[in-house]
Amino acid sequence: MFMGKVRRQFIIFFMQGYIRRQIALRQGECRQCAACCNFTYRCPLLKKGNACSIYNTCRPRVCTFFPINQADLNDVAACGKICGYRFK
């Protein structure tokens, strides 16, 4: 999962075209289950009940674009969760 965070950061900062293409293929919606917020460490922006305190205001790009690809969905599945997103 740690390598997934590194991979996502690299993609966010250096592969803008790839992100646009992937987002166009993404379907579904966020379930706000916070699985992606707890991969390596618990996000400090989570409130009690795993609700994001900045979900509708100023989320970091890595959060806004999650999941970028199937590898991200595989990370969520490895945590025992099911993401609300899928790719065509």
Image (cartoon, grey):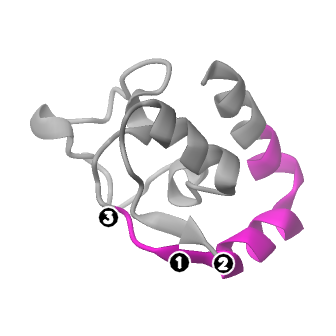
Question: Is 65 located above or below residue 45 in the figure?
Answer: below
Task: Give the side of residue 33 with respect to residue 37, left or right.
Answer: left
Dominant SS in magenta: helix
* Front in this rendered view, residue 82 or 48: 82
Q: Residues within 10 Å of mark 2 (few under 14, many from 20)?
A: few
Mark 2 and mark 3: Cα distance apart in space = 26 Å
Mark 1 or 2 closer to N-term? Answer: 1
Q: Residues within 10 Å of mark 3 (few under 14, many from 20)?
A: few
Q: Please state the horizontal and vertical placement of residue 51, each as a whole percent of the image.
A: 20, 45
Q: Residue 1 colored magenta?
A: no
Q: Residue at coordinates 37% horizontally, 34% vertically from top-left?
A: 80
Task: Give the side of residue 63 with respect to residue 46, left or right.
Answer: right
* Front in this rendered view, residue 17 or 86: 86
Mark 1 and mark 2: Cα distance apart in space = 7 Å
Q: Please state the horizontal and vertical placement of residue 52, each as a whole percent of the image.
A: 27, 46
Residue at image mark 2 = 88
Residue at image mark 1 = 27
Q: Amino acid at mark 3?
A: Asn
Q: Residue furthest left?
A: 48
Question: Is 12 located above or below residue 42 in the figure?
Answer: below
Front label number (2 vs 3): 2
In the rendered image, which quarter is residue 9 located in? top right
Q: Residue at coordinates 60% horizontally, 24% vertically from top-left?
A: 1
For the residues labelled 1 and 2, say whether their Cβ atoms are less than 8 Å apart: yes
Q: Secondary structure at mark 2?
A: loop
Q: Please state the horizontal and vertical placement of residue 18, each as a whole percent of the image.
A: 84, 65
